[in-house]
């Protein structure tokens, strides 16, 4: 059966997948980040410590990274649709169970481990499906799916905050779980990829690693994973600590929090801008430029102490770290066979999650040790420059084809 059959979409035309993927990543990440909204009402109602409740977020990120590798491998074997369906069911169920938790341990297990594991079912399978369904517009398509994650803190979290004020945390969390099923289940049918038998980058003669084990031990993956890890380690510390740093510079709390919002908004624009640029000039050079921007923007926080200056740096920093994130998937598609994209992206996401967890901890340790955030931002610049250096070693991949071509089923 050829790809012209109605049962299979044509390359660069599977925009229903992009739309469904953006919605699903938005809801999944939004549910995870909604814990910040529940923090105070949870503590007031249950008496659980803030540290204990916050530990659920740490568990969620770790579970997301670890499970993402498994979900990605399953999507290579069975396709993205059943994996994403399982993720939707588990995400709603975990939220419902978390709303019924009567002990802190139960809450940490349901919200932390189960919701984190469920959220991991979306990124690698959906991004992998997108990367093999597009050629000329691959960067833009991946960026649009990734933009769903950027929108999440500005949509799901405020909605949860509004509902908490009306109904309390238990009813709100229960409603979010049921709402997840109602909103996402109808869109699972759009999660499908173009059946692919060719190698990377649309090159029919390419010879990528034949299996996942060889791919994960290849120089290309070591570079990809190393750059992804260093990139996330470089920006996670400034993301987490900049509000505290701004308050230390004399800004009021309300104004300082808007810096974080500015970074998030700039990240949305950066994803689209960098995605379009990658389609034109290739993912590798755009990634290197973005990593350099991120490194120098991070250290630039030390040069500002007024809100306008913080906003200016936040726009550049947010655009850089937001724009670079989708490019790793584009690089993976250039270097690895389409049939193991889920496994490769799942493993890369695991490394990036470790980098994300490392930055805030190291930043806090440096502040406790030296009484200043200066070494955090200097260290972020150094690690960011290292990420750019690692990315430059990525092997030259095939450029996108000049026109969309059909695949055989």
Image (cartoon, rainbow, N blue to C red):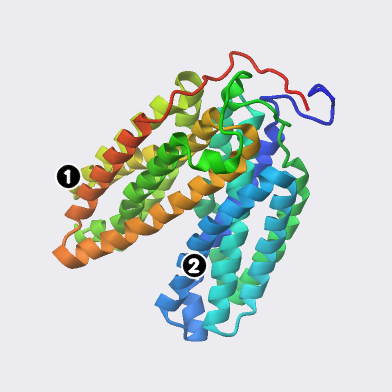
Quarter holding the N terminus?
Answer: top right
Residue at (46%, 40%) from the top-left corner? 325
Residue that badge 2 annotates: 59
Residue at (59%, 64%) from the top-left corner? 115
Q: Secondary structure at mark 2?
A: helix
Residue at (59%, 85%) from the top-left corner? 102
Packing grade of label 1 (10 A; few <14, some 14-19, many >=20) is: few
When the figure is inspected, residue 3 is found, relative to residue 211, above or below; the finding is: above
Residue at (52%, 64%) from the top-left corner? 60
Closer to the camera: disc 1 or disc 2? 2
Is the C-beta separation of discs 1 and 2 under 8 Å? no
When the figure is inspected, residue 275 is found, relative to residue 299, above or below; the finding is: above
Quarter holding the C terminus?
Answer: top right
Q: Position of residue 208 (x, y in %)?
A: 56, 29
Residue that badge 1 annotates: 303
Q: Earlier in the sequence, mark 1 or mark 2?
A: 2
**In the figure, is residue 340 to the left or right of 376?**
right
């Amino acid at each position: 059966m050829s790809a012209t059959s109605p049962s299979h979409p044509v390359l660069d035309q599977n925009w229903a997948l992009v739309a469904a993927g953006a919605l699903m990543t938005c809801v999944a990440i939004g549910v995870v980040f909604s814990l910040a909204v529940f923090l105070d009402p949870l503590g007031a109602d249950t008496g659980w410590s803030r540290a204990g409740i916050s530990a659920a977020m740490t568990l969620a990120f770790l579970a997301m990274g670890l499970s993402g590798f498994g979900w990605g491998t399953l999507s290579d074997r069975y396709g993205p649709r059943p994996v994403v369906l399982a993720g939707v069911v588990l995400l709603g169920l975990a939220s419902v169970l978390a709303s019924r938790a009567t002990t802190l341990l139960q809450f940490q297990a349901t919200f932390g481990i189960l919701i984190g594991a469920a959220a991991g079912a979306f990124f690698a399978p959906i991004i992998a499906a997108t990367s093999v369904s597009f050629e000329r517009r691959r960067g833009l398509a991946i960026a649009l799916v990734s933009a769903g994650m950027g929108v999440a803190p500005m949509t799901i979290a405020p909605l949860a905050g509004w509902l908490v004020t009306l109904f309390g945390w238990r009813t709100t969390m229960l409603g979010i779980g049921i709402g997840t099923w109602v909103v996402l289940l109808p869109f699972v049918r759009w999660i499908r990829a173009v059946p692919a038998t060719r190698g990377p980058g649309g090159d029919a003669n390419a010879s990528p690693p034949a299996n996942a084990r060889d791919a994960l031990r290849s120089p290309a993956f070591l570079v990809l994973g190393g750059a992804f890890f260093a990139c996330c380690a470089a920006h996670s510390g400034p993301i987490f600590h900049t509000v505290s740093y701004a308050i230390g510079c004399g800004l009021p709390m309300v104004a300082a929090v808007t810096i974080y919002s500015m970074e998030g908004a700039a990240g949305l624009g950066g994803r689209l801008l960098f995605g379009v640029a990658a389609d034109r000039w290739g993912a590798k050079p755009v990634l290197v430029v973005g990593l350099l921007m991120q490194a120098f923007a991070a250290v630039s926080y030390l040069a500002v102490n007024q809100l306008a200056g913080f906003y200016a740096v936040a726009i550049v920093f947010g655009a850089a770290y937001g724009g670079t994130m989708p490019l790793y998937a584009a690089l993976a598609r250039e270097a690895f066979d389409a049939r193991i994209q889920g496994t490769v992206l799942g493993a890369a996401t695991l490394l990036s999650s470790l980098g994300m967890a490392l930055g805030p901890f190291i930043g806090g340790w440096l502040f406790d040790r030296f009484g200043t955030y200066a070494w955090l931002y200097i260290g972020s610049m150094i690690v960011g420059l290292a990420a750019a250096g690692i990315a430059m070693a990525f092997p030259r991949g095939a450029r996108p084809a000049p026109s969309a071509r059909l695949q055989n089923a």
